[in-house]
Image: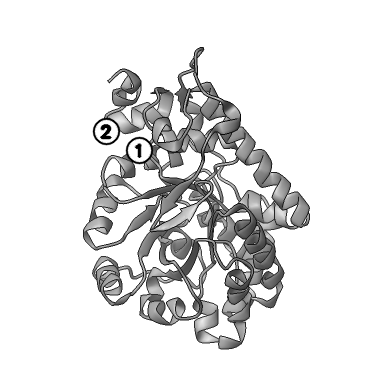
Amino acid sequence: MISDRKLEHLLLCTHSDVEYHKKTGFKDVELVHKALPEVNQEEIDLSTSLLGKKMDAPIIITAITGGHPSSTEVNQKLAQVAQKLNIGMGLGSQRAAVENPELASTYNVAREEAPDALLIGNIGAPQMEQAREASEMMDLDALAIHLNPLQEAIQPEGDLDTRGYLENIQKTVEIMNIPVIAKETGAGISGNDARALENAGVKAIDVAGAGGTSWAAVETYRSRDKNMGELYWDWGIPTAASTVEVSQSVQIPVISSGGIRNGLEAVKALALGADAVGMALPVLKASYLGGEALLSFFQKFLDQIRVAMFLVGASKLEELQKTDLVIQGKTREWLQERGYETKIYARRSSL
């Protein structure tokens, strides 16, 4: 059953080693220190607007859970923090509730606890015909269509025919009365795919790059044959590289997620061109320690963001994207080989 699989995924992500072995690429990104920042750290403004919704910080709790009774409490805690801090929250795939309405409460609790927060629904690309039902399940601000070919390729019950996905995304966009987001699930999005998605009408892209949770790893634990999952455990476009590729290729908002684990990495992603950053696994783990621990996690994360912005002299997010940074190592090699400009970031504050 889908519901049982959702619980299995939740438990594996919480208790097993499911993260990429290779890095996100953010260690190759160096923010240029400013000895004269001319900023009051206590007055740094993290507020932003995404898809018409005002947020107090550019953070989204990206799609984690839903579809099993055990996930209700998790979504409740996450939504309470999203409401308190006025940040965004994404739901896990709503397929389970579309096919079994008795499970709708495991998702609906998010809007009940976070009436004002940016709330993003979720349906898989293979189930796009369920998009309208998913969007009508509750008061959503946007619907993410998640792309997970890597997981499907490794998953024992995976959907292996992706023909027509782009055309179906365009059709889905046309029938929806809320913005549609294209979201990968941990293997990244290239600039070429981003342009195709923008042309299809999506209103934002979540790159969900390689470096965080590997769904090949998750499915390795579920599969009898471990070889395939172990072989493709680290498959994908590193998050830093994907963030640059997508932000240089489209005009719509970009969400950077995939292995972001602290505020410094978040600032690097934002400085590379992301409009917001997303996290899932560390938030999920913090939620199991209780509501206070979850709130403390985010407060520390926000403090880390402010310190990094202070040190580069950015008092608000618009200024952050004009500060200098240097891309080095494998990330620079990747981007330059792919034809993306890296030097434009190094001295942009003087332009």
Label 2 packing within 10 angstroms: few (<14), some (14-19), many (20+): some
Could one spot residue 23 in this view of the protein? no
CB under 8 Å between discs 1 and 2: yes
Q: Give the quadrant of residue 275.
A: top left
Mark 1 secondary-structure assignment: helix
Q: Position of residue 261 (x, y in %)?
A: 60, 41
Residue at horizontal 67%, vertical 43%? 299
Expressed as whole percent of the image width and height from the top left, the position of residue 288 reads: 75, 57
Q: Residues within 10 Å of mark 1 (few under 14, many from 20)?
A: many
Q: Amino acid at mark 2?
A: Tyr
Relative vertical location of residue 292 with respect to residue 316 in this rendering, above or below: below
Residue 252 screen position, x and y as percent? 30, 51
Q: Which mark is residue 244?
A: 1
Q: Residue at x 32, y 59 (%)?
A: 203
Q: Vertical placement of 26 versus 177: above or below?
A: above
Quadrant holding the C terminus = top left
Assign the N terminus to one quadrant of the image.
bottom right
Picture layout, residue 100 above or below residue 3: below
Colour mapping: one colour
In the image, farthest residue toward the top: 35
Residue 310 seen in the current view: yes
